[in-house]
Image (tube, rainbow, N blue to C red):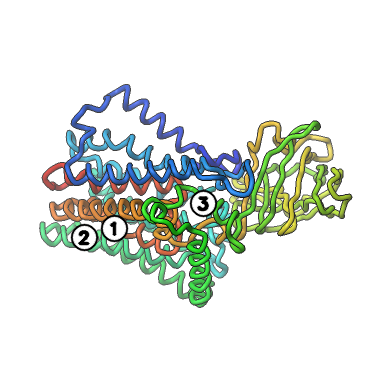
Amino acid sequence: MIPALDLGLWTGWMVVGESDFFVLITLAVLLLRAPPRPDDLLPALWPRAVLLLLVAAYAVSTIIGLASPLGYTGHSDNPFLRPDNALRLAKAVVEALALLPFIRRRQRTHHDAVSLFAYGMAAGLMAVTVEVLAERLLFASILDTSTAYRVAGPFSSMRVGGGHIGAYTALALPFTLCLFQFRPRWVGTVLAPLACLAGAYTLAVTFARTGYAAGTAAMAITGLGGLWIATRRRMRWAAIGIVPVVLMLATLAGVADFTGMYHRFADSETDLSTREQNWWAGLAVRDRDISTALFGMGLGSYQRTMLSRSPVNRPSDLVLDRDAAGPYVSMRVETPFYLGQKITVPDNGPWHLTFWSRSPDGLVASALICDKVLLYSDNCQSADTASAIPNQWTTLHATIPTTGLGRWALFGLLRRPVELSLSGRIGHRIEVRDISLTDDSGRPMLANGDFRHGLDRWIFTDDSHVSWRMLSQYLMLWFETGILGLTAFATLTGLALAGGLRALRGGAVTGAAVAGAIAGFMISGLFDNVLEAPRLATLFFLVCWCGLIQWDETPRCQN
C-alpha cells in the first residue's frame, strides 16, 4: 500500500500523504492486538548501535533544520522552503522505526516476517505496474517505446523531478523472486515470473539510465544468490529462479537498443556535466565550519539555502497571503514553475475562465489547460492574457475550447487527466486570486479557486529539476546531515546488507532479495536524491530492518 496509494495529484497534499494514514492505522491495530514487549524493543548489539547512530543523526539534523533561518523571507507555503521540511523528511525513519518492534516479534516467533514483507513488496510492485500501464495507455501506448515518455506512476513526489519510481522499482524487483517459495508451489511458480516481468516493464518505461543499472545489479545479486542456494541444497526446481532475471535483462536490453532510449545514453556525457555543475553549485553555498562538517546544514535545508545564497539553481517560491479582499497566492518564479489543479472536462462546450492577477511590473499570470499526469503536458490550450497596471489587480476572462482534451481509452474505462495550470515569467513575481472555471451552463469545474481552504487540491510542478536537489544522495546527506549522517547511512546499509548475506548463507532466498534490494537502492542514489521522497525512504528503511533482524537469531531458511 505504501507505494501504490498516492492521491497527491488530486488532493495537493505534500507534507502528509495517504500512506501515512495507512501506517498509523496499521500501528493502531498492532498495538491493540499485540503491544510490543521489552524483547521486541531491543535488537542485537550491533543493530542496536547502528539504530542509535541513525536516530542521533536524524535527530540532530532535524533540530538544526528546524532552527535554521528560512532565508530571504519570513514565510513560505512551499513545503520545500519551510524549516518544517525537516519533519517531512524525518517522518520516514520514524514510521519505519515504529514498525520495527512488530517485525522483530513476528520474525522471532514465526521466522517468516521477511517472507511476508517480500510478498507485500511484490504485490506493491504489481499494483504500481497497473498504474504505470494505465498512464502509458493514456499518453503513449503500452508497447510503443519509440519515444521516451517517462512515467511517474503513483509518485506525486516527482512533481519537481527525481527518479523515485525507478529507485522504487529497483528496490522492489528482487523480492519478486521470493514468490517462488509461495505455497502452493505452482502458484508461486506462476506469480514470480509475472511479478518480475511487471517490474521489468515498469523499470523499462522509466527510461532512467541509473534505474536500469540499479535494477540489473539488484536482480543479478538476487538471482545469483538463489542459484547458489539451489546448487548448495540440490534443489533443481529453485534453479528456475534465474529465468525471470534473464527475462528482465532481455526486456531492458530490448528497450535500450530498439527505442528512443539510445538518445538518453548518447546524452550521458552532457548530463554528467550538468550533474557536476549541480554538485559544485550546491557545495558552494554550504557553510565551512566544523559544526557543519559534523552535523550538516540541517535536514530539509538545501532548497532554501540555494534560494537565499546561490546565483544559480534557485527554486521558485509560493506564498498564500491575505488582504482585505481575502486570500491570494503569490508566486516568485525562478524556474518553469506551475500551480495547477486536476479538473473535469465538460460534456460539451468550452470552459470559461476568470481570475484576478497582479504583479509589480504589470505582468499577468498565464493560464494553460493541458492533458497532464505530472511530468509532461499534451494538447495544451492557452488563455490569452495582456499586460496590466503595475501593482493593481486586473480581472482576466478567457474562453478555452475543450477540443481534444481528456480523451478516453480502453473502451471508455480510462480518461486522460486534465489540469489547469497558472504560471508567470521567470524572474518575476506574480499574484492570483478568485480563480473560476465553469462550463457553458455555469457549473463550476474548479475546487478551492478562492484559496479559502489554503492550497488544498492545488499542486505545483517544476521543470527545472536541478533547482530542488543535489543529484546525488550521498552529497545531499553530506550537505544536510554532515559526517554523522553519512556515517549512519553507510553503517546502516553495510550491516543490513551483511545481514541479508548472513540469511543467504543460511539458505534463505529472502536474504538474497534483501542484499540485492539494498545494493540496487544504493546505486540509484549515485545520481539522484532518492531519500527525498518519504514513502520511498520508509520502504528502504523497512528493507534495511529486514537485514538487521537477521542478526537477532541463528540464520535459518525461510521457505
Ranked by sequence position, the earlier of labels 1 and 3 is 3
Ranked by sequence position, the earlier of labels 1 and 2 is 2
Residue at the extreme top of the image, as rendered: 32
Task: Looking at the picture, tell me which residue is in the foreground, 95 or 240.
Answer: 95
Q: Secondary structure at mark 1?
A: helix
Residue to which mark 3 is pinned: 153
Whole-percent x and y of residue 166? 44, 58
Ranked by sequence position, the earlier of labels 2 and 3 is 3
Query: Mark on residue 189?
Result: none
Residue type pointed to by label 1? Gly
Instruction: Answer with the quarter of the image where residue 26 lies.
Output: top left
Residue type pointed to by label 2? Gly
Q: Residues within 10 Å of mark 1 (few under 14, many from 20)?
A: many
Task: Looking at the picture, tell me which residue is in the foreground, 276 or 554.
Answer: 276
Residue 29 position (above or below residue 140): above
Residue at the extreme front of the image, as rendered: 289
Task: Looking at the picture, tell me which residue is in the foreground, 84 or 530.
Answer: 84
Q: Residue at x 37, y 69 (%)?
A: 250
Q: Secondary structure at mark 2?
A: helix
Q: Residue at x 46, y 69 (%)?
A: 255
Whole-percent x and y of residue 16? 51, 37
Residue to which mark 1 is pinned: 516
Look at the image and tell me whether residue 559 can be seen: no
Look at the image and tell me whether residue 252 can be seen: yes
- Label 1 – label 2 distance at C-alpha: 9 Å
Q: Assess whether mark 2 and mark 1 are in contact (beta carbons under 8 angstroms).
A: yes
